[in-house]
Image (spheres, rainbow, N blue to C red):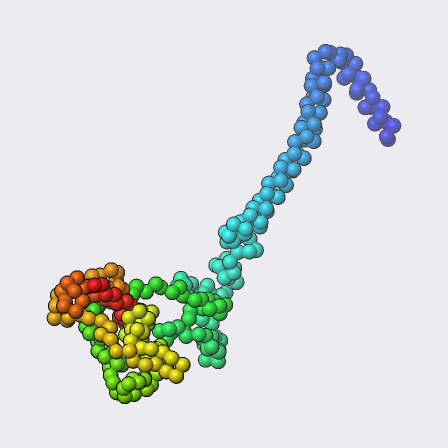
Amino acid sequence: MEEKLREAKTKMLKGELADLTFTDEMKQRVLASSYGKRQKLYFGKKIIPSLISAALVMLFFAGMYEFVIIPNLGGSQHGPTGDVGSEEGVPDGQEQPDPQPDGQEAILPDDTEHEADLPDTNDGLPASEDGGSVETDDIGTVIEEPETDTVQPEPEKPDVMAMTKKFRDEIKSLFHLDRFTPEPEYKAKHAATKEEFFRPLEKMADPKFFDYLLYRFLKETSDGVYLQPQDGPLYFEEDQPYETQKLADTKYQMIQRLDTDMYGPNYTITVTVNYIGGKWIITDIHMDY
């Protein structure tokens, strides 16, 4: 059977293709068809790998931007480093918690139960001068507040004449005869040196000028000090004109010029006072004749 079919096919081909001529046009079509298939095959082999490589590069840079660059810039709203508790991270079936106001933290139920047991973090901190506690930071470090410079008010103008009069009265009381033994000795009863004798005056005057103004009225020996009678240590008239000059906020000077029979027509007394230790004291007394 197969042999008969083979013979019939051969006769048919010989009959139909007996006059077939393979022309140049047919050759060109065959070549064109073959070249087109090669071009399509070459195009597929060349372009497809390039497209795949480009897609992989794009995926790589997209991953770098998503998981490395954005978290480092602080925009951690995407990827695995996104904020926990955002709407995207809430499991199905759970409600999104209400956001807290700025500057407040959410209070968990367990926190309120144990709040009374927490130790007082202010215990042991030094107290400020006004009775409050010193401020601390979040880790308990004491923050010292800077001291503010306090401006001292200007002291009131002193009454230099009244101070000079009081100083003279104190000197007179020191030289009262009851403080010395009877004549002819006139030895001081309660002082062994000149410094000790005039010490009561130091509460109102600087002892630096006692040497030339007062020490000449005493004679100091190995067994004590003795009175040397002389004219008074300073002379002024409180009912006569005088002038008070301001040399500084804490320094004033009183000047009185007198025409006297004892000291002549050009007698001048100058008293200087300074504000020291919260009070006015006499720092110098000078007399010109």
- Is 81 placed above or below 124 here? above
Of residues 125 and 12, the one nearer the viewer is: 125
Name the residue rendered at 72%, 11% in the picture: 24
Residue projecting furthest to the front: 184
Of residues 107 and 154, the one nearer the viewer is: 154
Q: Quadrant of the C terminus?
A: bottom left
Number of numbered tags placed on the structure image:
0
Q: Does residue 50 appear left or right of residue 276 in this picture?
A: right
Name the residue rendered at 15%, 70% in the picture: 237
* Image spot of residue 26 (x, y percent): 71, 15
Name the residue rendered at 37%, 82% in the picture: 224
Residue projecting furthest to the right: 3
Quadrant in the rendering for residue 181: bottom left
Residue 201 showing in the rendered view: no
Q: Quadrant of the N terminus?
A: top right
Name the residue rendered at 49%, 69% in the picture: 140
Q: Does residue 55 appear left or right of residue 222 in this picture?
A: right
Quadrant in the rendering for residue 279: bottom left
* Image spot of residue 280 (x, y percent): 26, 70
* Image spot of residue 169 (x, y percent): 21, 78
Of residues 97 and 243, the one nearer the viewer is: 243
- Is 223 placed above or below 71 here? below
* Image spot of residue 131 (x, y percent): 37, 75
Residue 12 showing in the rendered view: yes
